[in-house]
Amino acid sequence: DVVLAARELYRFYRAGEEETLALRGVSLRVRQGETVAVVGPSGAGKSTLLACLAGLDEPSGGEVRVAGVRISHRPETERSRLRARHVGVLLQSRNLLPHLTVHGNIRLAQHALRGRPAVTADALLEQVGLGRRAGALPRQLSGGELARAGLAVALANSPAVLLADEPTGELDGHTEQLVLRMLRDRAADGCAVLIVTHSTEAVRGADRVITLNDGRAHEEHKGTAHTKE
Ligand code: ADP
Ligand code: ADP
């Protein structure tokens, strides 16, 4: 079952005289339970792709569907409603608001959905091993705890699709393993997981690897994939 689909995505930026075509016809599909790693050099369009998939940014052309629903080419309020319902976004620790506790950050994410969440904040905290840090502020957490808290927020509404931008970028080896294991567990539960990453560990653990180069995507078959150093 395909729960994340992008068709012929283009993203054109104009900044003064400078014009950039950051995405040049990117198509991809991710099924339930699949983990896809997106790799490529700096400037290849990875962050732009992730933002378009999450409905944080609008592609200039093409279409994004999550859980069968088109999320692109809608007003921002509708995109954020659809994102809250179907998509978890993990941006290192940057998806935490500094003045809210860990528990408060999860509740805020759940509030965006209005209805009763499928999983309580307390259950989520237990799931990521932060049961005893519910009342802590982000700045009081260690790197590993921050990573777990960010994941709990991304999972607050039991998303069908989990998108992560360099989720292990600033982490030590031990914490990286922990985050990758948590992402694998979510995929085992049926989530479609897409990770933008430079980590060879993350690439090794993925079912599929998509390489972006100058706004174009191509998929290398695992086994012959050239992992980035
Ligand atoms: P990556 O994440 O792979 O490093 P990005 O998606 O950040 O690549 O950037 C792709 C290209 O688009 C780069 O040339 C970058 O400079 C350009 N770009 C990204 N965001 C913007 C923006 N907001 N305005 C103008 N150009 C941008
Ligand atoms: P990272 O590699 O950490 O994703 P990027 O270089 O892609 O960092 O860009 C960080 C932020 O700056 C992103 O929000 C991106 O959209 C924006 N950005 C990147 N390039 C440009 C640019 N040429 N002009 C304006 N904004 C840009």
Image (cartoon, rainbow, N blue to C red):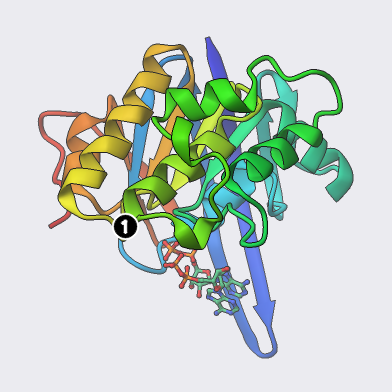
Q: Give coordinates of residue 39: x percent, y percent.
A: 31, 50
Q: Quadrant of residue 84?
A: top right
Q: Is residue 137 left or right of residue 131?
A: right
Q: Residue at x 50, y 52 (%)?
A: 91
Three-letter amino acid code at the position of disc 1: Gly
Q: Residue at x 58, y 25 (%)?
A: 122
Q: Quadrant of the C terminus?
A: bottom left
Q: Give coordinates of residue 28: x percent, y percent.
A: 48, 33
Q: Is residue 144 left or right of residue 10?
A: left
Q: Give coordinates of residue 43: x percent, y percent.
A: 41, 68
The residue lying toward the viewer, choosing from 7 and 191, is 191
- What SS does tag 1 mark? loop
Q: Is residue 12 above or below residue 87?
A: below
* Residue ID for mark 1: 169
Q: Residue at x 68, y 14 (%)?
A: 118
Q: Give coordinates of residue 140: x percent, y percent.
A: 46, 59
Q: Quadrant of residue 204?
A: top left
Q: Is residue 213 above or below residue 119?
A: below
Q: Residue at x 67, y 26 (%)?
A: 86
Q: Is residue 37 above or below residue 183?
A: below
Mark 1 is surrounded, within 10 Å at the Cα level, by few (under 14), some (14 to 19) or many (20 or more) other residues, namely: some
